[in-house]
Amino acid sequence: MTELFLVTAGCFIAVTGFAVLVETPKKYILQAGVAGAGGGWVYFFSIQRGMDVVAASFLSALVISLLAHTFARIFKAPVTVFLIAGILPTVPGAGMYRTVYYIITDNRAQSSYYLMQTLEIAGVIALAIFIVDSLFRIRLRKYRKPAGESAGEGQR
């Protein structure tokens, strides 16, 4: 349990630092950190429970995207303000490093394995962001008035 807390805190600190680095507006830095920490918590919790890295990355990206969209609605800011920094814990940087490392050491089997895993993780991150974005767009469209209809029109 302590390890889960430390990983979550580490994700929060890393994402907050990255948010500063990519010049996220100061008033949104903590929210970006919370989005990243939430995703990091889900990823690490899933890995601890024996889930595959790709599936854990998908769930993590879903949570980060959901939090980014929620914060965007609450704080009236673009989703990317929270999503760019928040997605950092899920990005497969170590996979790309291992791919290049095994290419250099001429271990084709390992380099192919890590390349495929990295591409799968990148794909599920994009898929998770797309799914949450689509769900929010459908939900928003459902609650908006049709174009050209104003209050009182049609009640004659």
Image (cartoon, rainbow, N blue to C red):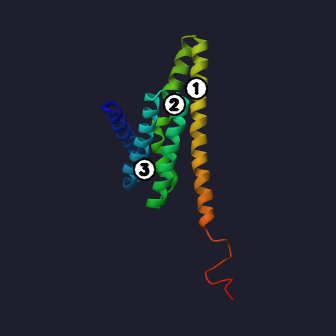
In this rendering, the label closer to the viewer, 3 or 2: 2
Q: Residue furthest bottom?
A: 156
Residue 105 screen position, x and y as percent: 54, 11
Residue shown at the point (45%, 60%) measured from the top left: 74
In this rendering, the label closer to the viewer, 1 or 3: 1
* Residue located beneath label 2 in the image: 92
| Label located before the other in sequence (2 or 1) | 2
Q: Amino acid at mark 3?
A: Thr
7 vs 51, nearest the viewer:
51
The secondary structure type at the circle numbered 3 is loop
4 vs 93, nearest the viewer:
4
Residue 103 screen position, x and y as percent: 57, 15
Residue neighbourhood size for the residue with mark 2, other residues' Cα within 10 Å, grouped as few (<14), some (14–19), many (≥20): some
Q: Which mark is residue 117?
A: 1
Residue shown at the point (62%, 52%) measured from the top left: 134
Residue neighbourhood size for the residue with mark 1, other residues' Cα within 10 Å, grouped as few (<14), some (14–19), many (≥20): some
- In which quarter of the view is residue 10 placed? top left
Q: Amino acid at mark 2?
A: Pro
Considering only vertical position in the picture, is 154 above or below 125?
below
Determine the CA span between mark 3 and mark 2.
22 Å
Q: Residue furthest front?
A: 49
* Residue located beneath label 3 in the image: 24
| Label located before the other in sequence (1 or 3) | 3
- In which quarter of the view is residue 153 placed? bottom right
Residue 52 screen position, x and y as percent: 53, 27
Q: Residue furthest left?
A: 2
Determine the CA span between mark 1 and mark 3.
30 Å
In this rendering, the label closer to the viewer, 2 or 1: 1
Residue shown at the point (61%, 68%) measured from the top left: 144
| Label located before the other in sequence (3 or 2) | 3
